[in-house]
Amino acid sequence: MIYIKSASDNPYFNTASEEYILENFNKFINTDGDNTEDIFMLWRNVPCVYLGVNQNAYAEINLDYAEKNNIKIVRRLSGGGCVYQDMGNINFSFFSNASGENILNFEYYTKPVINALKNLGIEAELKGRNDLLINGVKISGNAQCVYNSKISPGTKRILHHGTVLFDADMTKLSQVLNADEEKIKSKSIKSVRSRVANVADCLPEDKKIAAGQFKDYLEDYIVSENNCKIYNFTEEDIKNIQYLTDNYYCTSKFIYGTNLKYSFRNKKYYNFGTVEICFNVNNAEIKDAKIYGDFFGESDIKELEEFLNGLPHDNKIIKESLYNNFDKSEKNISRFIKGCDIEKFAELFV
């Protein structure tokens, strides 16, 4: 097995690293000259929310809370539910050739983590489809995907990755994953909420350690148990991963999706009146926008509704577009909704 040492805490770079490894690391050939060696990697992220590949960010995440608390929104390659991560989470990834034995075999890939926890005096077990539990409480979620190579058609690789809640901020976890389901009617896959706990709270008193120390412990344990060879990303690797990060994983098109279909509805109460907005989203664009409320205005609200149609449902882009078009004295947004400004109006879209 190969162990890749990565010092990055950028969730977009780390996710891009997984695709880069899947696509390019057939350089590690077993001594039989045939099968590519398994690869293992550990990593941590600054605060972020990880979406499954088929999920809708608007239906899963409190985007307003995420923006105010500088929590990044990231989409991964695999399916499954939505998870919060910060530097108190330890992420692990395994990369293997696809075979009948390892496809959707969660036990095979979680066993090293279970054994490492056991060595610390913690009895963890795989329960349900993809969770690791301690005393019936979830401490790890896992997901898999079968990756079809883009540059080597017919080549299939397995990515199995999971996150271990070690000392994560549970307040932020509960707040940012608390999307208002009344606002959005989505057909995308929904997360299944579970009761969760931090591993740090389960450690025996004589084995208390910090998150960084736990990552080092997992690294040492798994590398030792599997006689891993160590690999560090080269300058060329980092350059290629950064290109993938900047041009794909950081883009709104990938994060928020282009083929999602859903209906959005939100209402807010201001001192100048109630404002309600409703629209559909198709191919990532706002359609059929309608604005209701008991507010006053001097211009026909239909002009503002028509302006919104065709924009992506991306709060930053909407805000920028409003500033570019309605932040002038003769076209100020308050002429549609007396007393309203662009910042307040943009709150309606999250």
Image (cartoon, rainbow, N blue to C red):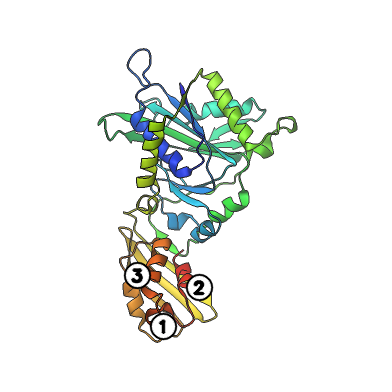
Quadrant of the rendered image containing residue 19:
top left
Amino acid bearing label 2: Lys
Residue depth check, mark 2 versus mark 3: number of the one nearer the observer = 3
Nearest the viewer among 112 and 68 is 68
Q: Which residue is mark 3?
A: 308
151 is higher (above) or lower (below) than 230: below
Q: What residue sits 49% from the left and 58% below the top? A: 63
Label 3: state its secondary structure.
Answer: helix
For residue 335, the mark is 1
- Give the spatial CA distance, label 1 vs label 3: 16 Å
Q: What's the CA distance linking mark 2 and mark 3?
A: 18 Å
User: In this view, which residue lies farthest toward the top?
Assistant: 32
Instruction: Give the alpha-carbon distance from disc 1 to disc 2, as whole Å.
Output: 18 Å
Q: Quadrant of the N terminus?
A: top left
Q: Is residue 312 left or right of residue 267?
A: left
Looking at the picture, how far across and down is residue 24, in whole percent?
34, 30
Residue appearing at x 62%, y 32% in the figure: 214
Query: Neighbour class for label 1 at 10 Å: few (<14), some, many (≥20)?
Result: some
